[in-house]
Amino acid sequence: MSLFGKIKDAIFGKKPAAVPVVPVQSTSAPATQVTPAPAPVSLEISEVDVEVILNGFALKSEEKLNWQTSIVDLLKLLDLDSSLVERKELAKELGYTGALDGSAEMNLWLHKRVMRELGANGGKVPAALLD
């Protein structure tokens, strides 16, 4: 799974796997009739409020994390690896073209890009976190 995928799943939650509709033998009908199982109900939310979810995680965290501006703190809040190795991989995945050195420039770019990607993938992200 991609690193961004892990971030998205941590915030949006994992989508349940599709439940196949399996024909079920009806006990009251003749042996030749089959009654289909009810179709699964889709509970998909069209837009996830990223700020509300992350603030909720922050309230439960024992650490004071500045997830609003720090990619390291955002990853820690989501209980994901925030090491330089992982941030370099995330930067490559998201198309960062600068030096992969863990600089403030790289980290700020990563944070903004992650927020933009969350917005592009169904998240409601405040404009202040996109700039």
Image (tube, grey):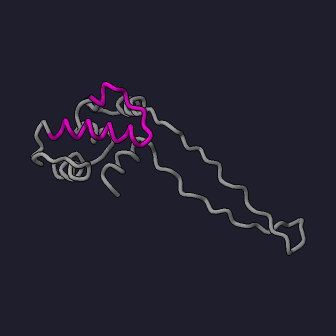
Q: Is residue 83 left or right of residue 50?
A: left
- Name the residue located 17 percent from the left edge and 52 percent from the top edge: 85
The image quadrant that residue 112 belongs to is top left
Residue 105 included in the magenta stretch of the image: no
Give residue 4's position: percent from left, percent from top.
Answer: 32, 49
Q: Which residues are magenta?
A: 106-131
Name above or below for residue 35 compared with residue 63: below
Furthest residue in direction bottom, as rendered: 32
Quadrant location of the C terminus in the rendered image: top left
Count of number-bearing discs:
0
- The dominant secondary structure in magenta is helix
Give residue 23's position: percent from left, percent from top.
Answer: 73, 67
Quadrant location of the N terminus in the rendered image: bottom left
Work out whether residue 23 or residue 109 is closer to the camera in this orientation and state it: 109
Give residue 69's position: percent from left, percent from top.
Answer: 24, 30
Residue 108 included in the magenta stretch of the image: yes
The image quadrant that residue 78 belongs to is top left
The image quadrant that residue 105 belongs to is top left
Furthest residue in direction top, as rendered: 128
Q: Is residue 62 left or right of residue 48?
A: left
Give residue 43's position: percent from left, percent from top.
Answer: 59, 44
Name above or below for residue 48 compared with residue 96: above
- Name the residue located 67 percent from the left edge and 62 percent from the top edge: 21
